[in-house]
Image (tube, rainbow, N blue to C red):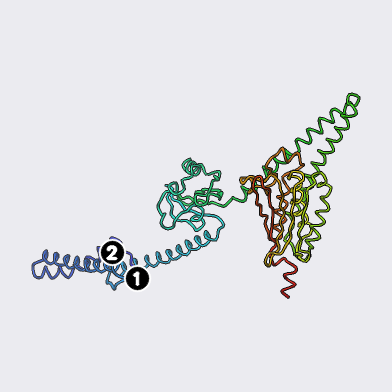
Amino acid sequence: MGRNYTLSAILRGLLVYLLPFVLAGWYLDVVWQALALALLLKLCWHYYYINRLTGWLWDSRTLLPPMGKGVWTDIFDGIYRTLRRNQVRQRSLSTLIKRFRQASEAMPDAAVVLKEDGTVTWANKLAQLYFGLQWPGDNGIRITNLIRHPRFVKFFKKGDFSQAVTMHSPAHASMEVEVRVMPYADNQFLLIARDVTQLTKLERMRKDFVANVSHELKTPLTVMQGYLEMLDEPELLPAKQLHKAIHDMTAQTARMQNMVNQLLELSRIESSGPDSFTEEVDMAALIRSCVHDVSLLNSEKQHRIEVSLDEHLSVYGSADKLRAVVMNLLTNAIKYSPAGGTINLTWQRRHLAAAFSISDTGPGIEPEHLSRLTERFYRIDADRNSATGGTGLGLSIVKHALEHHRSRLQIDSKVGQGSRFSFVVPAELIVQAKADAT
């Protein structure tokens, strides 16, 4: 520990230093010259050590101080101790910053550290992915110059960060991100953004679902309410009209029951866990059974149903789900094709996999509708679907049932030339293929 340099101690030391010079000057009768020489030597001595201090601080690569004498020993030692403490603090701070950055990189959210003026001081990798930032290239640039979405710019300039703002990602137009800004430390801000694309999609689906179910139930309930009001005064209702009322209410009840059954079927398929693929499904027998079950429906349309089946091509999967797939596709082909048409069903091996297809001679589907056909309640022509009793749920059931079998629905259609619906069951789910491998 250094000595205590009080004013009295400094004066005492100076007197001790000057005393020999004063005595020598008095003896030689040159007192003032001796004092001047003493002070000059003292200044040169201090200048020498100042020069060594400057060289150590600016040019030396070592932390060890130069050797000193007198007060300079304490000065060098004090500076050395301060540098050591700062070095330890810097290492500790670097470790904390490193851990913070590692934790930020591990976060499932994008993170950007901002100064009070909104300039970027750090950004993690997800921030670079979500917003197209470049680090460290964007260091010191205002965030509103990097994220120029009008909603974000207005949100940031307003300065009210109590609520989050949702917007499209500047780097990915299909991605929705929720952005929050939180003040912390001394006039700094932490911008956090998370991907809410799926949540937004689910919320939109929920709203559409409620709206569609309400719309689907409104018509039959209105019809039934009207007839029930008429039945409240049966003496004013002719027998012929009474028969029509009962027939229409029965039809509307069947329509609602069909919709409820399809909703339950869709919910059951979506909520079911992964299939174990231990059940062997005889697809040829299943398809023939479906053709037989729709014979009554087809009796009105008189379609010619042609079937080409590989009798030995079975799959591992869920018979109930695969039956729902075939029944929905076959029912749609019968309902939406003009009477007297031709429907072709095939179930054949395709290389190591198996392919199912059903084609009809219906009116065809416009290209803009093809990508949305498997959405819930989506219907090309609401009036036509209402007349046929369609709910817009059948192809959604098909889509989800096929996903459980590692497959997807392929739709090919040309207006005026009919439509073709097909899917391929992968090789690992083919019973015969596994048997051949052994």
Where 151 sits versus 171, above or below?
Answer: above
**Horizontal relation, residue 208 to residue 11: left or right:** right
Residue 426 in picture, x, y percent from top left = 68, 64
Q: In the rendered view of the protein, which quadrant contains the C terminus?
A: bottom right
Residue sitting at 72 percent across and 56 percent down?
A: 401
Residue sitting at 46 percent across and 45 percent down?
A: 148
User: To which residue does mark 1 refer?
Assistant: 63
**Horizontal relation, residue 421 to residue 97: left or right:** right
Secondary structure state at the residue bearing disc 1: loop
Residue 431 in picture, x, y percent from top left = 75, 68
User: To which residue does mark 2 refer?
Assistant: 9
Q: Earlier in the sequence, mark 1 or mark 2?
A: 2
Q: Amino acid at mark 2?
A: Ala
Query: Dot 1: few (<14), some (14–19), or many (≥20) neighbours within 10 Å?
Result: few
Q: Amino acid at mark 1?
A: Leu
- Towards the viewer: 46 or 149: 149
Which corner quadrant of the image does residue 64 belong to?
A: bottom left
Q: In the rendered view of the protein, which quadrant contains the N terminus?
A: bottom left
- Towards the viewer: 97 or 418: 418
**Horizontal relation, residue 236 to residue 420: left or right:** right
Query: Dot 2: few (<14), some (14–19), or many (≥20) neighbours within 10 Å?
Result: few
